[in-house]
Image: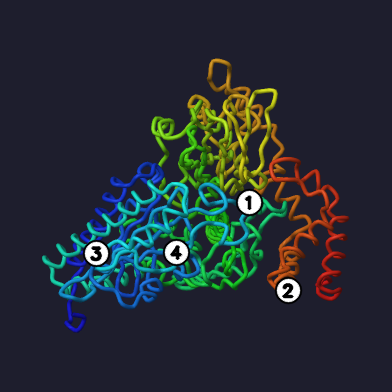
Amino acid sequence: MGKETVQLDPILLEILNRKVAAAADEMAVTLQRTSRSTYVKEAADYGTGIADLNGNIFGYPARNSVNHINRFCGPSIRAIPDLKPGDVIVTNDPYLSGGLATHLPDLHMIKPFIHAGKIVCYGWCFIHFSDMGGRVPSSISPSNHEIFQEGLRVPPMKLVRKGVLNEDFVKIFTANCRTPDANMGDVQAMLGALHTGSERVADIIERHGVATFVACQKALQDYTAEKTRAVLRRIPEGTYAFWDYMDDDLVTRIPLRFRIAMTVADGKIHIDLSGSDPQVRAAYNVPTLGIAHPWLMMRLISFILTNDSSMALNAGIYRHISVTNPAGTIMNAEFPDAVGIRHAAARRLSDAMTGAILKASPDIMAAPSCGASVPFVVAEQSPEGGKPAVQVIEPLRGGMGAWKGHDGADNRENTMNNMNNHPVETVEADAGVVILSYDIHPDSGGPGRWRGGVGQRITTEVLRDGCTILARGMERLRFSAWGVAGGKPGRPFRAILNEGRTDETELSKIDQLSVKAGDTVTFMMPGAGGFGDPYLRAPESVRTDVERGFVTREATADDYGVVITRDGQVDDKATKKLRSGRVRDNIRADFDFGPEREAWEAVFDDKTMEVLNTGLYSLPKSVRQEKRRWIVSQAVPDLPVAGTRSLAETMADPDAIRARLVKAMAEVFGDERAAN
């Protein structure tokens, strides 16, 4: 095996591509249908694939999320050098798995597929487990600051030896999670998926021969790499810088900046993240190990596959992408940084990538999507004092960005993954809650000639005392998804406890929210950015949006210059008058970032942030966040919580704030560096 020369003509290669993808897809079907967890059965937060001898995925099902096209099984495979038939590797540790896992709730398994006594490839799968132990129910809390708080760490090890389950592992695993029965059910589902994969691979080898099967692994990746490069050549050559912000890291009120410099040359892309903020003492760090990791590339990968949906899905898609990502940035976590909510940071980096591509060519990229995905979790103790229940109520989503000629998709933003919503009946059967309403968030989509997609709105009533709400990934409370080419930003995220009651409370980011029976929690997901001047939107399209509930009649005049009558028709005369009288000074030809970001950058502009971060990176990691917090607090002592008081109000005197900032940086870094 491996020495025989095999010629694969294009037809045979396509047949093999379809067969290995089908094998991986059958693994996915097996896993989903045998899982015990709602988050897998309904939302589909899992992945399957078939990897070559180097650990790179070459067989991947279309039903999986594209950011799971992984190429990092290799380190975990090499950590177990004595693999035998029937063995299965298990791991969930981002640092010890070499980039395979990215946070502890994602449990990965790898199984060698063997023919005639030799390994011919590997089966891979993962599931997001609802709880992996740790400090809080569901294991994920933004206020965690080290991975030891986030649950049970599993280095690459053998879960199964020669077909026999490692009972010692099972005892440790079930003793360290809050939902042991469901977790073990999902472990069995993963093992079943791997068994299915091994059978399907055996079928392919029986039909085409082992030499042909091994040869197709590299050939498929070469084919995808070639097609990827053809797509990347559509981006004009040059270097394009862009940055975007998370609202804060919860433990401070300071925005987090993600800066990208994208260099394009002949279908090859280099991404420089060295201008991004340092890691935080919270769970938003991303463990990418300084390599061109899938979690850095999600927006770029979706761009590639949007422009060529015919290519084989495999690790070849990464071949012409390189990265500079120094250790210690928020996008390159170092042990033992907490990483539980790495998806929030990766999402904001994706928005920065969106901006870089738009700078290169606004005709080939959409405006940013909503910028938030929120697994809404309820943890409750059994009324009888039994085992706690941890349920994901919904994986909440916003809208997708508009692009030239098209409105953004509403409610189900999928630039990061394709997770489904949970049926209300399933949620209410499994958790002590009632879904009072599950609808759209009107007016949340950014106004534009082409409207940004709107977000979801959900209101849930808690039925039992002693429950805890967790909602990791709440973002865009402060910095909305920005508009493009005259389009306006989307509406921000909102969360409200007991909406409409005397004890109504506007919520900012939630760590753990204690609730009692009868309390309600309402989440209003943010909308996506609009594209193009909203006063150029066809009035009939605005009327249709009102009819369908995406835009309220009250908002049409301000947002679109369209007057809708009480009976739901366009008042042509009033609309023409309103549109002709508009002052056009507030129409941005490039990007409309909104007043909050403009207020922040009136002080913390790109040059200032370069000086600040250069100084911070020169300090030991152990004191960077302390010094960062002190410097910003000296400059903006009354910095508000995201989603409460406006930055535009707080920073109304940017000259005074800048003077305090320069003084604080000089005290920490020295006068010469601060002056630069």
Residue 629 % position (x, y): 76, 59
What residue is shown with label 4?
154
Q: CA distance from mark 4 to mark 3?
A: 20 Å
CA separation in Å, label 2 and label 3: 51 Å
Q: Nearer the viewer, mark 1 or mark 3?
A: 3
Q: Earlier in the sequence, mark 2 or mark 1?
A: 1
The location of residue 602, given as percent across then percent down, is 77, 55
Q: Quadrant of residue 161?
A: bottom left
Label 4 secondary element: loop
Residue identifier under label 2: 619
**Mark pair 1, 3: CA separation:** 57 Å
Amino acid under disc 4: Val
Tell me the quarter of the picture where residue 144 sits.
bottom right
Camera-near label (4 vs 1) is: 4
Residue at position x 58%, y 36% in the image: 444
Q: Left or right: 285 with respect to 4?
A: right
Q: Is residue 462 left or right of residue 60?
A: right
